[in-house]
Image (spheres, rainbow, N blue to C red):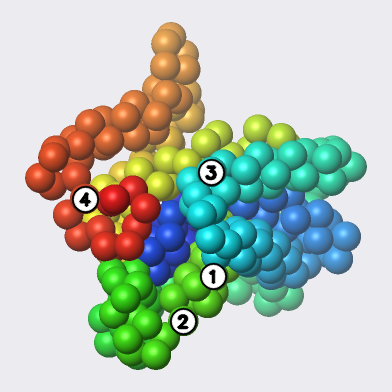
Amino acid sequence: TPFLFVSLGEVLSERSGRINLGLEGTLVFGAMSGYAVAFLTGSPWAGVLAAAIAGALFGLIHGVLCSIPRVNDIAIGIAMMLLGTGLAFFFGKPFIQPVAPGWWSDVPQLEAALRGNVLFLIGIAAAVFLWWMFGATRIGLIIRVVGDSTDAARAMGLRPAVVRTLATAAGGAFAGVGGAYLSLFYPGSWNEGISSGQGLMAVALVIFARWNPIACFGAALLFGGAGALGPALQSVGVSEGYYLFFAAPYVLTLGVLIAISSNTQAMAGAPGELSITK
């Protein structure tokens, strides 16, 4: 689920022509914000909303900074990643021990269903929605035009900087919700090492999925399965060397980057204005 939400957020940002390496920090800060608000209010839904707002704020700051002339997207992304993780560690200290509320509905049957991972179902719907939006709506067309050619967008009377900033903010909101899953569902607690680099791995996942939201869903299942391999082996009694399988997502990320590093196919389908294509 975190891979799915962060990758969808990165697709939204990159399709507008801006790479956001700061989503790792957004993911961590979203996890802390969601957990803290859920604990203070007693509502996990309020926690998810708070995580989305926090992520959108980080994305908005990232977008505004990147709109300044001669500012590098990648450098700002790294700075935002450090800022997000630092702020999360600082403000999250009081919430390391408390347990956030786990109920999602007052209706017992609905509560049981939602405990099965409601955010995963929302993520699937979001992937389908983004795929439809990019291909069949005016908003999707505007984002694609801005991502492919700044000159063409200006000729159409669009403001590329504004479009990219809004797309980056929306992408940050997706990443924030991915962080809320980590703290409210699995592992269901807040700690400073909660993300394990999933925000950065999602960038490779987006390239692997060729900037297609539906393909991001499939890639998220693949990466999530790799991440679940170690705990699954431990649960069935494989105790010798099982910890090596915890490295499976990182090995998979490296393998994906090697597989897509062809000179002719590496950036196939990438938006023309994306900084890594130039």
* Residue at mark 2: 159
Q: Amino acid at mark 2?
A: Arg
Residue 158 in picture, x, y percent from top left: 42, 86
Residue 52 in picture, x, y percent from top left: 64, 66
* C-alpha gap between disc 4 and disc 3: 21 Å
Can you tell which mark lies on residue 267?
4
* C-alpha gap between disc 1 and disc 4: 23 Å
Q: Viewer-proximal residue, 59 or 17?
A: 17
The residue positioned 42% from the left and 16% from the top of the image is 244
Disc number lying in front (2 or 1): 2
Task: Compare marks 3 and 1 and give the one earlier in the sequence.
Answer: 3
Q: Amino acid at mark 4?
A: Met
Q: Amino acid at mark 3?
A: Ala
The residue positioned 20% from the left and 60% from the top of the image is 269
Q: Could you say whether the residue bearing mark 3 is in a helix, strand or loop?
A: helix
Task: Compare marks 2 and 3 and give the one earlier in the sequence.
Answer: 3
Disc number lying in front (4 or 2): 2
**Which quadrant would residue 142 be assigned to in this image?**
bottom left
Residue 79 in picture, x, y percent from top left: 62, 43
Task: Compare marks 1 and 4 and give the one earlier in the sequence.
Answer: 1
* Residue at mark 1: 165
* Residue at mark 3: 75
Disc number lying in front (4 or 3): 3
Q: Is residue 274 visible?
A: yes
Instruction: Check whether the beta carbons of the residues at disc 4 and disc 3 lie within 8 A of each other.
Output: no
